[in-house]
Image (cartoon, helix red, strand yellow):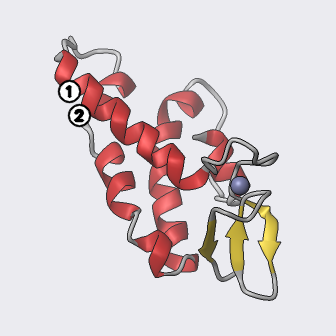
Amino acid sequence: MKNICCNLEVQVKFRFNDKNEKRMSDELLNELKSKINKSAGEDLKSQVLIIDRVASSSILRNLLSHDNPFNPKLGDLKAFWADVQNLKKIFVCQDKDCKKSKVSMKNYDTVNNKIRCGCGKTEYDWKK
Ligand SMILES: [Zn+2]
């Protein structure tokens, strides 16, 4: 998650103390969403649903709060994990020969305004 956001230059204010780790998935997901809404084209915006699902998951909420007793059902965990994997797939090229599989601003295509992975098979419209 951190890698994805770093690669897309999602900005989050840095805070000291342990809150930094706890809030990260939650806040990063929201930052990622707003970044996509601002910069991404329709192809990537259509994927926001998956980000939403992960962000609003009760499992994520429970993981973030240490106080609650937490007994997730295996089925719920599996569904959550599948969502997380799908989320990752959006931003990580699935081609096994891809050398730099993470979709990144480093591979920004200034001619076509796209962000892409190293091999270019995974690419999205993106305005800077
Ligand atoms: Zn690739």
Sequence-wise first label, 1 or 2: 2
Question: Tag 2: residue type?
Answer: Ser
Question: Tag 1: residue type?
Answer: Asp
Q: Is residue 13 left or right of residue 111?
A: left
Residue at 39%, 63% (x, y): give it. 48
Residue at 52%, 47% (x, y): give it. 89
Residue at 53%, 78% (x, y): give it. 38
Mark 2 lies on a secondary structure that is helix
Q: Is residue 14 left or right of residue 67?
A: right
Q: Quadrant of ligand 1?
A: bottom right
Please tell me how crowded label 1 is: few (under 14), some (14-19), or many (20+) other residues with Cα within 10 Å. Answer: few
- Identify the disc placed on residue 58: 2
x, y percent for residue 29: 47, 50
The mark lying in front, picked from 1 and 2, is 1
> 34 above or below 96?
below
> 84 above or below 13?
above
CB of mark 1 within 8 Å of CB of mark 2? yes
x, y percent for residue 81: 36, 30
**Residue linked to disc 1:** 76
> 114 above or below 77?
below
Q: Is residue 73 left or right of residue 59?
A: left
Query: In the rendered image, which quarter is residue 60 located in?
Result: top left
Between 27 and 98, which is closer to the camera in this rendering?
98
Q: Is residue 101 left or right of residue 126?
A: right
Query: In the rendered image, which quarter is residue 122 located in?
Result: bottom right
Between 124 and 55, which is closer to the camera in this rendering?
124
Identify the image quadrant of the N terminus.
top right
- Distance between the alpha carbons at the discs numbered 1 and 2: 9 Å
